[in-house]
Image (cartoon, helix red, strand yellow):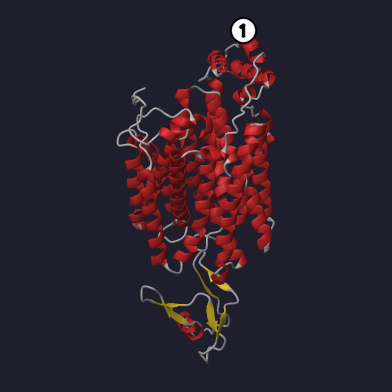
Amino acid sequence: MDSIFDRALSEIGQDGRFQKMFDIIYNVVLSILWTMAYMNLMLALIIVPYTCHIPGKPNDVSELSWRQLNIPVYTNAAGEVKFHNCLMYTNYSLHNNTKVCDTYDYDKTWYERTVPTENNWVCDKELYVANILASSKIGELVGSIAFGWYGDTYGRRPTYIISLLLIIFGRAVSLLAGTSFILFVFGTVVAALPSWSVLQSVTAISMEISSPTNRTLTASLRFAGWSVGLAATALLFWCLRDWKIFFIATTATQVPFLLFSWKMIESPRWLWVQGKTKECVKYLKYIAKKNNKNLSKETEEEILTYTPVKNTHGLGYLALFSGWTLAKNTILQLIAWICYSTSYTVILMSSGEKTDGNPFLESVWQSLAELPGYFIAAWLADRIGRRYTGSNVVFRNSLVGSTLAVINRMSATISYSIITIFNMELYPTCIRQSGMSLGNLFISAGSALAPYMLYLGRRYSQLSNLILIGISLFGIICIVLLPETLNEKLPETIEDAQAFGKKKLKYLPVSSQS
């Protein structure tokens, strides 16, 4: 079925100037800027150190003495006596009744203004921050379902354009929300809907117009852009210090892509499969012109007379659970996604909070640590296998201390790469995209747990650490139970996938050199 289209790609150039420029603009530049626009919420919601504001301090009384008169103390889990951050005495001469602080003093060493400091979302209202972040993950989940279907039904190009509109509109709503928690959440959810769809749309187009040998490079460029974007986000907030200016600066980067979205091509392969052959030929000729190539008349005629074969098998999400082996592999992968995404998001969110040094530089180092992580993952996976690489890294992820946060972040990145490889290699070709989309849903579900883990960690750090270790151990079990895919022939049909891992496979090993 693909022979006609593949022949057309060979004629117009599968690795020409157009593909290279497309990758640079969309899989590198857009990936970096989209990451900044989407991840700006994480830094804007940072809860900085704070104390209860005590008005009316006499000039002849020291700050410490004034706090001792007005603020109750408590003993934390480490046995240290601390001033309470959220309570003060109603009458400092009678240390018997307390009340919630009216206002707060915030540490402005690194952050001039964040959303929690502007709205006093601290103490009991810290849960507001967790709820906002969790709602964004719910938006990701809904958007993954909706835009996955929309992209396959109506095309990558309209998905790309609508997604850009949504993130700009959503961030604008949050920016103008004022003190309204509900309005801020609404804007957050709207902006979260296209979290996966923009980059997935451009990556899909790139892969569908490129040679098979360049598809791994395309995915790697996108991942690298994500890591660089995270580092750039931290550096920009360090310079601006104010969440509103930061929101405007990072979200505005999407406006040029929206204004020039009319230049975005539709995937010619998608058009061909859908039977929209005239549009397909139009884009093929456009690519050919940019690559100084020509589409032959014979190939053009074959494409124009092609009749697509309609899928009557009703394959979809339910097919991922058809048969014990396929269902088992699907469930194990989904659990592993939850374990990974929870751990990774906790690491990502905590990098800007609990640190004795510069939180922005810590975020930068951890983000840049992801870059070698992708290459290390590929190298290890091709030598010791996917299972051993994934299980060892997930385990170390839970044990490495905060002093080695960079290694922790790199380990999380390797985990992501390994589970992604499993996701592509265990599912058969006919339902591979459905399997990847379902994985995205569970990534969002796991990420939604992370804000509550941080909330718990601020109060019971030992319990939070134990839970994270337990999650990581559970992830190890899931990865070890998956069948090894190194040098195995990929399953093409559901029957192949159901036999994959049951026993010694009938597939012949594929040389890693091929």
Measured as percent of width and height from the top left, residue 216 is found at 45, 30
Where's residue 320, x and y in %?
51, 39
Location of residue 451 in the rendering, given as x and y in whole percent from the top left corner: 51, 59
Which quadrant, please, contains the C terminus? top left
Q: Is residue 470 above or below residue 290?
A: below
> 217 left or right of 250?
left
**Dot 1: what SS?**
helix
Quadrant housing residue 304: top right
In this figure, which residue is indicated by the disc labeled 1?
298
Quarter-of-image position of residue 177: bottom right
Q: Please tell me which residue is depicted at 60% across the width and 43% down the height of the picture.
A: 145
Taking the image as drawn, is residue 234 in sight?
A: yes
Q: Residue at x 36, y 27 (%)?
A: 506
Position of the N terminus, as image quadrant, is top right
Q: Nearer the viewer, residue 385 or 268?
A: 385
Residue pushed farthest left?
384
Q: Position of residue 366 (x, y in %)?
A: 41, 49
Query: Measured along the vertical axis of the image, is residue 237 above or below residue 388?
Result: below
Q: Residue at x 63, y 38 (%)?
A: 149
Foreground residue among 503 and 40: 503
Q: Is residue 23 left or right of residue 185?
A: left
Compare residues 200 and 169 and report the one nearer the observer: 200
Observer-nearest residue: 343 or 116?
Answer: 343
Q: Residues within 10 Å of mark 1 (few under 14, many from 20)?
A: few
